[in-house]
Image: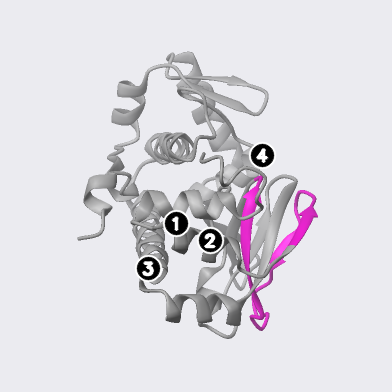
Amino acid sequence: MSLKLIGRPLAPLVERLARLSSLDDADREKLMALPHTLRTVGPSTHLVRDGDRAEACWLLLSGFAYRYKITGEGARQIVSIHIPGEFVDLQNSLLTVADHSVQTLSEAEVAVVPRQALRDLVLANPAIARALWVDTLIDASIFREWVVNVGRRHSRARVAHLLCELCLRLEAAGLSRGRRYELPMTQEQLADAVGLTSVHVNRVLKQLAEEGLIRRDRRSIIIEDWNRMRDTGDFNERYLHHDPQRLAAP
């Protein structure tokens, strides 16, 4: 992280967007100057509720959060997991009503950015607009992969795929060491992310551990055999678009 960013609250956002698209010093400073309110919230705190009218966008600075939908019968489907540096509801900068809920997985620090301020910044700065556009497209790419994961992969592959994805996303954000990372999710939450029961998820995690693919230490996941884990999860990281050369501005 640049020394210019240390101690500045919106640094995780700037670092993330700079990995996705070319931003000069002026662009970075404008992002840093976005008006915002800092909040520290506990686990299981709702940041957004389905049906809320959008007045701000929530930027995750530390901790984890997830988006979810509830069926008419009350079943929950987790549709994405978010890590520091990500807006958890960027669509609310333009859409007026939230169509899903967002809840924290762990204690988290968030920045609440007025949506009009974000819209004004984007309209006046093409490079920042491009970076947020790329961010939105990658978000959509991850959604597509999750649809395939829940709809077409078997249970072992679903769990392995999700664990591989989180490993690489946290690694790209500088939030993991090697193949070890924190995963503050209960087995029930994991089950709701992959469309299985918590009992089934527990069985799969035990199998992966017994076969030497992963090791668990409390809330930590250690991927012991990356190649086998990737094959088990039918995992191809292309959809994460982590290649900076492909994302560089023309």
Instruction: Please state the horizontal and vertical placement of residue 171, each as a whole percent of the image.
Output: 45, 34
Identify residue for label 2.
Answer: 29
Per the image, label 4 sits on a secondary structure element best described as loop
Q: Is residue 241 magenta?
A: no
Contact (Cβ within 8 Å) of mark 1 with mark 2:
yes
Instruction: Please state the horizontal and vertical placement of residue 77, each as a whole percent of the image.
Output: 55, 58
- Whole-angstrom CA distance, mark 1 to mark 4, is 41 Å
Residue at point 48% right, 40% down? 173
Rendered image: mark on residue 164: none
Mark 1 or mark 3: which is in front?
Answer: 1
Instruction: Return the disc, 1 or 3, that comes first in the chain's sequence.
Output: 1
Residue 229 sits in quarter: top left
Magenta stretch bounds = 38-63
Mark 3 or mark 2: which is in front?
Answer: 2
Decide if residue 40 is on the left or right side of residue 67: right
Give whichever of 51, 199 is nearer the camera. 51
- Whole-angstrom CA distance, mark 4 to mark 3, is 32 Å
Contact (Cβ within 8 Å) of mark 3 with mark 2:
no
Q: Amino acid at mark 2?
A: Glu
Identify residue for label 4.
Answer: 186
Instruction: Please state the horizontal and vertical placement of residue 149, each as a whole percent of the image.
Output: 37, 49
Q: Amino acid at mark 3?
A: Trp
Identify residue for label 3.
Answer: 133
- Whole-angstrom CA distance, mark 3 to mark 2, is 19 Å
Identify residue for label 1.
Answer: 25
Mark 1 or mark 4: which is in front?
Answer: 1
Q: Amino acid at mark 1?
A: Asp
Q: Is residue 58 magenta?
A: yes
